[in-house]
Image (spheres, rainbow, N blue to C red):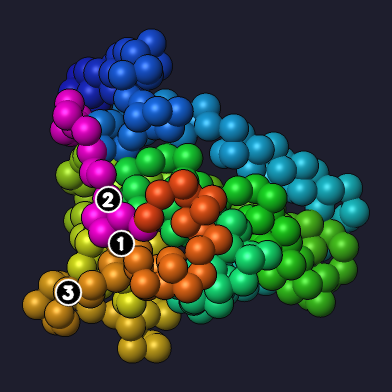
Amino acid sequence: MSTFNSEHSEGFWRAFWNARKNQGSLRTGRSFDLGKMSLPHLWMAYLTYPTILLYFALILTSAAAALWFGPKAAPTLITIVLVVGIYPFAWYAIHRFILHGRWLYRNPLTASLWKRVHFDHHQDPHLLDVLFGSPLNTIPTIAIIVMPIGWAIGGISTAFAALSTGLVMTCIYEFFHCIQHLAYKPRWNWVAKIKQLHVLHHFHDEDGNYGITNYAADRLFGSFYKDARARPRSAHVFDLGYDLEEAQRYPWVMKHTGAPPKQRPDGARRGSAAS
């Protein structure tokens, strides 16, 4: 068994470094194309991506700040548990009511924000640079949601502990979100299941399965569906309702894009990697 694990580990790291040397072939334009990548390719891209490196730095910085201000064990533990529990419900609310809402693209002041934070991702689900949210949007949002929880429980130390926990959760979510768009069949049944549910969100009906790793909120609020037979296919799964008619009425996203909304994504290019 130890020999097998050693050989498996060596094979993974060999593939990782080969992917690092050949990362140019994994790109479509300036972005990594998840449709071309295997799991070692993803690890290489994820662990070197500037947004993720920024999150790592902020996790360490906020954890250090929490320690500096003298944490107490019980309030810190309570804060961590609460943030972990609240995070999937906060993500659900943001995803369903803001990212899939239509009010952002109907305002010229927020149209470019909506385009960047979610429309581009549904138009090209395989592209890594539109899968990750912009840190200018994600970091303030995380801080606004979780730091007051920590502050209410134990003051400034637990506020920073909450921020560190929220950023850790974001990194976990982002990694599994990548796997859900990766040319890779997960071996762990739970990962395969959440991948299937997220693929339905992108390719069958966008008005459901808003979770990433946790679908409790979807089940609670009636937006969960387990397979394509559960509901008809949506006409707006790729454009989120911003179709040609809407683009004519509210042209600001189309102007930023430089093209009409696509009715289907380009998908993975030739040479897609398989696990």
Residue sitting at 47 percent across and 49 percent down?
257
Position of residue 73 measured from the top left corner of the image (x, y, whole percent) = 75, 62
In primary-sequence order, the first of circles 1 and 3 is 3
> Do residues under tags 1 and 3 come within 8 Å of each other at their CB atoms?
no
In primary-sequence order, the first of circles 3 and 2 is 3
The CA span between labels 3 and 2 is: 16 Å
Residue density around tag 3, few if under 14, some if 14–19, many if 20 or more, within 10 Å: some
Classify the position of the N terminus by image quarter.
Answer: top left
Position of residue 137 measured from the top left corner of the image (x, y, whole percent) = 66, 56
Position of residue 74 measured from the top left corner of the image (x, y, whole percent) = 73, 69
The reply to whether the magenta stretch includes residue 267 is yes
Q: Residue 264 sits in which quadrant?
A: bottom left
Residue range highlighted in magenta: 261-275
Callout 3 secondary element: loop
Q: Which mark is residue 238?
A: 1
Residue type, mark 1 in image: Phe
Residue sitting at 88 percent across and 55 percent down?
70
Residue type, mark 3 in image: Arg
Q: Which residue is mark 3?
A: 233
Residue type, mark 2 in image: Pro
Q: Which residue is mark 2?
A: 265
> Do residues under tags 2 and 1 come within 8 Å of each other at their CB atoms?
yes
**Is residue 141 or residue 152 the one in the foreground?**
141
Classify the position of the C terminus by image quarter.
Answer: top left
